[in-house]
Amino acid sequence: MKTARSKFKVFLFAPENAQLRSLLAQHNNVRRAFYITPRVCEPYMRVRVRQFSNSVIGIAKQFAATAGPIVEYSVGEDQGGKMVGTVRIPEVERFDEVVKTAKEFCEKTLADGKGFFFTCRVSEIIARTERQHSWVEIFAVERREVSREVWQDAVRALAEAIGGEAEFYSASVIEY
């Protein structure tokens, strides 16, 4: 498991909402994403929260009642009680394929006799400058109804299905 002692990233996942998108896009990078469960595959937004950007958190909190649950993740914090798994695919043109594979994987995981309700978010990260790289990222949070080992094995299996490698991080999670 990777952890960052002094550096961590904060970002939000929120249901797709045009007004919220326009407000958050003024402050941060809003990226296209999908929230995927065994029963739904719906458009979401992934928002990178820049350091000391309390205005973004404030905007998100105001919209939580109307836009749906907005979840804030601080990834890399040592005191975080949750574990998150990420899989990065460097070929951004595979975004739609990764969404489809993740949807099928979530459905299969629940349908399996020993399965569980596996959820993930797939984000399309488009570079803003030539020196940066674009990628597709799968993000999953551990589930309390299964052991950490079972959940990690599922994340690894999804990573293998799409041709990536799973990495695990400590995180704190706040839902608005």
Image (spheres, rainbow, N blue to C red):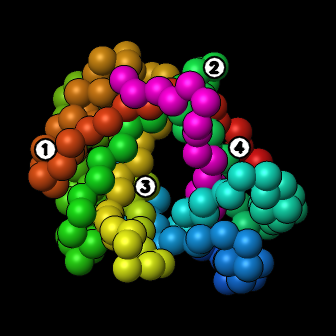
Q: As shown in the figure, which amino acid type bears the numbered disc 3?
A: Arg
Picture quadrant where residue 110 is located: top left
Label 4, label 1: how far apart the Cα atoms are: 30 Å
Q: Earlier along the polypeptide chain: callout 4 or callout 1?
A: 1
The residue tagged with tag 4: helix, strand or loop? strand
Q: Which residue is mark 1?
A: 160
Picture quadrant where residue 173 is located: top right
Q: Which residue is mark 2?
A: 79
- Viewer-nearest of discs 4 and 1: 1
Residue 166 place in picture, x, y as percent: 26, 38
* Between 80 and 102, the one nearer to me in the picture: 80
What residue sits 63% from the left and 47% below the top? 10
In this rendering, does residue 57 appear at all?
Answer: no
Q: As shown in the figure, which amino acid type bears the numbered disc 4?
A: Glu
Which segment is the magenta one? 1-15
Position of the N terminus, as image quadrant, is: top left
Q: Classify mark 1: residues with Cα within 10 Å, few (<14), some (14-19) or many (20+).
A: few
Q: Is residue 52 above or below residue 165?
A: below
Q: Earlier along the polypeptide chain: callout 3 or callout 1?
A: 3
Label 1, label 2: how far apart the Cα atoms are: 29 Å
Judge from the rendering whether residue 151 lies leftward or rightward of residue 111; answer left or right.
right
Q: Which residue is mark 4?
A: 175
Label 3, label 1: how far apart the Cα atoms are: 16 Å
